[in-house]
Amino acid sequence: MFKTNKNYLNLKESYLFTDIAKKVAAYSAANPDKKLIKMGIGDVTQPLIPEVVEAMKKAAGEMGVKETFRGYGPEQGYGFLREKIAEYYLREMNVKLAPDEIFVSDGAKSDVGNFTDLLSNDNVIVVPDPVYPVYVDSNVMLGRKINYISGNEGNNFLPLPDDKTEGDVFYLCSPNNPTGATFNRDQLRAWVDFALKKNALILFDAAYEAFVQEDLPRSIYEIEGADRCAVEFCSFSKTAGFTGTRCGYTVVPKNLICDGMSLNKMWLRRQTTKFNGVSYVTQRGAEAVFSEQGLINVRKTIDLYRGNAKVMTDTVKKAGIWFTGGVNSPYVWIKCPHNMSSWEFFDYLLNNFQVVGTPGSGFGKNGEGYFRLTAFNTLENTIEAMSRLSKI
Ligand code: PLP
């Protein structure tokens, strides 16, 4: 008789987005004349830039001609894209990477989830609370012990290690989903120094790096020594609207060695065994993000979301509501006014202002009493939603 992985029984059902959808559908059915504004979505809304579309069309054309047709590509990504990513790190962040330290994938979610393959099951995993749920669930599936470090108002939702912090593998996400909070250099240095001292591994999720506009680190490798203790995950999803197109990359430095084993070699082995690469057409599209006009245009789109975030932070600031995020992130994390719980505030916003957001309690125990709003709607809708909200 075959046996299943019983660790799956330990996964908590995630009702968050289904519960939201149910409440929204019920409200819409009862109030068909009311215009709802959705600020809960973590998905982009602006289309791909023309440079990406043209590059993908051209690549699709090449695939239809015998002389330029391509079959399987390199599992770790085509050289043309990995070189562009390496140039981007050097130019934008002054971080030197070799192209073979960069692995192209179908997105950060797969890589964050799959990287756990490389780690022994007796590692103690540490995740911040509140958290992007993939870090937790991908480890629960393997039966690993998970410790939580507390994000709260006291530390601005940016927990730091101290003498009592214990664990082997630490997930960090900056700019953070769901809170939008972003580590500064000293804070990130504290994490890198801690990891080096404890021989711990940092799994750094930089999916929102392109939103950083202040003088804050966009890559963990901006911190000296991080190449000996950290892996970095990044994505074209939020940088260039690739949520439906699917492309991301993971950086595994060659200096990252544990027990004499190179994580770079292990990841290459893992990917060549279980993954057959991202489509040529998609990688040509991703390459076009780094063209001169491509970079100008993706920045325009990010500026548009940033403009929305500014409208949102201005409004909550004026209303005297505590918040973090929004400046270097498309997420604004607010404290529910009048001590409402996350779900009470959800119902209050929906019923009184027809604005939909995401209850913070869906991201962990510490999210209770907080609420996530996203900047991915249109400017008009954001302004409208905020003018409704200012009446709280
Ligand atoms: N990491 C974080 C923190 C995210 O919020 C998301 C998507 O919302 C991802 C990774 C997934 O990115 P991708 O679309 O590249 O799989």
Image (cartoon, grey):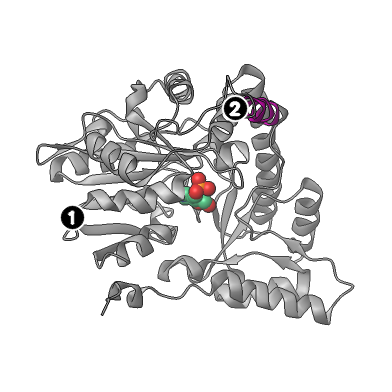
Does residue 336 appear to the left or right of 225 in the view shown? right
Estimate the x, y position of residue 155 in percent, counting from the top left: 38, 54
Does residue 185 appear to the left or right of 20 in the view shown? left
Q: Give the structural element (helix, strand or loop) at label 2.
A: helix
In the rendered structure, which amino acid carries the disc numbered 1?
A: Ser
Q: Give the structural element (helix, strand or loop) at label 1.
A: loop
Measuring 42% from the left and 59% from the top, which residue is drawn there? 134
Q: Residue furthest front?
A: 66
Residue 94 position (above or below residue 154)? above
Front residue of 123/247: it is 247
Does residue 350 appear to the left or right of 258 in the view shown? right
Measuring 73% from the left and 65% from the top, which residue is drawn there? 355
Question: Which stretch appears magenta?
Answer: 52-62
Estimate the x, y position of residue 60 in percent, counting from the top left: 65, 30
Circle 2 Cα neighbour tier, 10 Å, few/some/many (<14 / 14–19 / ≥20): many
Q: Residue 53 in magenta?
A: yes
Residue placed under numbered mark 2 in the picture: 289
Estimate the x, y position of residue 219 in percent, counting from the top left: 40, 33
Task: Say whether disc 1 or disc 2 marks the residue closer to the N-terminus.
Answer: 1
Q: Residue furthest left?
A: 259
Measuring 57% from the left and 27% from the top, which residue is drawn there? 284
Residue placed under numbered mark 1 in the picture: 120
In which quadrant of the rendered view does residue 46 lie? top right
Q: What label sits on residue 99 in the rendered view?
A: none
Measuring 61% from the left and 47% from the top, which residue is drawn there? 244
